[in-house]
């Protein structure tokens, strides 16, 4: 018995049918895709496609993070800061371009904040607490 599109989508956990790799593969290869490969093979292929998409996203975020890291004056705990940067992107969703511009515009700069009386938080803390949303002092 060939599972319906509904059954296949439920097993993959896709957010929406138009972005589900199995549905895309079925659309491209036609109705024989399940007959030729079976749902297990299609699920494996879908998993590999998702991993590739996630890897591309991580690389893109890493390039954006490196730009942030270059301007941030405090260079401590880079791995945690990168994790918080990725979480900020995930939380922002479609508004990410605007949030990224705010982060880059409001991030502390070495030349402005290089005084003893002004404390500069860790970059991970600054990102985790969404300090780019703070009002200007």
Image (cartoon, rainbow, N blue to C red):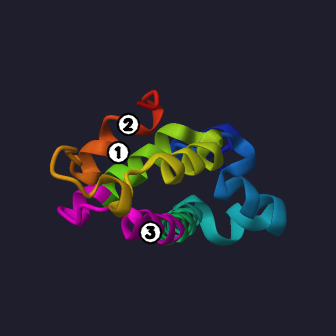
User: In the depicted view, which residue is nearer to us: 10 or 110?
Assistant: 110
Residue at the (54%, 60%) spot, across then down: 43
Q: CA distance from mark 3 to mark 2?
A: 20 Å
User: In the depicted view, which residue is nearer to us: 132 or 40?
Assistant: 132
Q: Which residue is mark 2?
A: 131
What numbered label is drawn on residue 62? Answer: 3
Q: CA distance from mark 3 to mark 1?
A: 15 Å
**Element on which disc 2 rests:** helix
Q: Residues within 10 Å of mark 1 (few under 14, many from 20)?
A: many
Stretch of the chain drawn in magenta: 60-81
Image quadrant in which you'd find residue 134: top left
Marks 2/1 in contact by CB < 8 Å: the verdict is yes
What numbered label is drawn on residue 127? Answer: 1
Residue 112 forms part of the magenta stretch: no
Q: x, y (%) of residue 3?
A: 64, 46
Image quadrant in which you'd find residue 28: bottom right
User: In the depicted view, which residue is nearer to us: 67 or 108?
Assistant: 108
Residue 62 forms part of the magenta stretch: yes
Is residue 30 visible in the rendered image? The answer is no
């Amino acid at each position: 018995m060939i599972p319906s599109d509904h059954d296949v989508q439920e097993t993959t956990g896709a957010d929406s049918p138009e972005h589900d790799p199995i549905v895309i593969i079925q659309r491209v290869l036609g109705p024989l895709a399940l007959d030729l490969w079976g749902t297990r093979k299609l699920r494996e292929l879908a998993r590999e496609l998702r991993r590739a998409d996630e890897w591309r996203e991580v690389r893109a975020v890493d390039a954006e993070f490196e730009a942030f890291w270059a301007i941030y004056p405090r260079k401590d705990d880079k791995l945690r800061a990168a994790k918080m940067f990725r979480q900020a992107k995930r939380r922002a969703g479609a508004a990410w371009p605007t949030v990224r511009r705010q982060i880059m515009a409001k991030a502390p700069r070495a030349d402005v904040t290089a005084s003893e009386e002004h404390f500069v938080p860790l970059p991970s803390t600054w990102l985790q607490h969404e300090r780019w949303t703070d009002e200007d002092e």
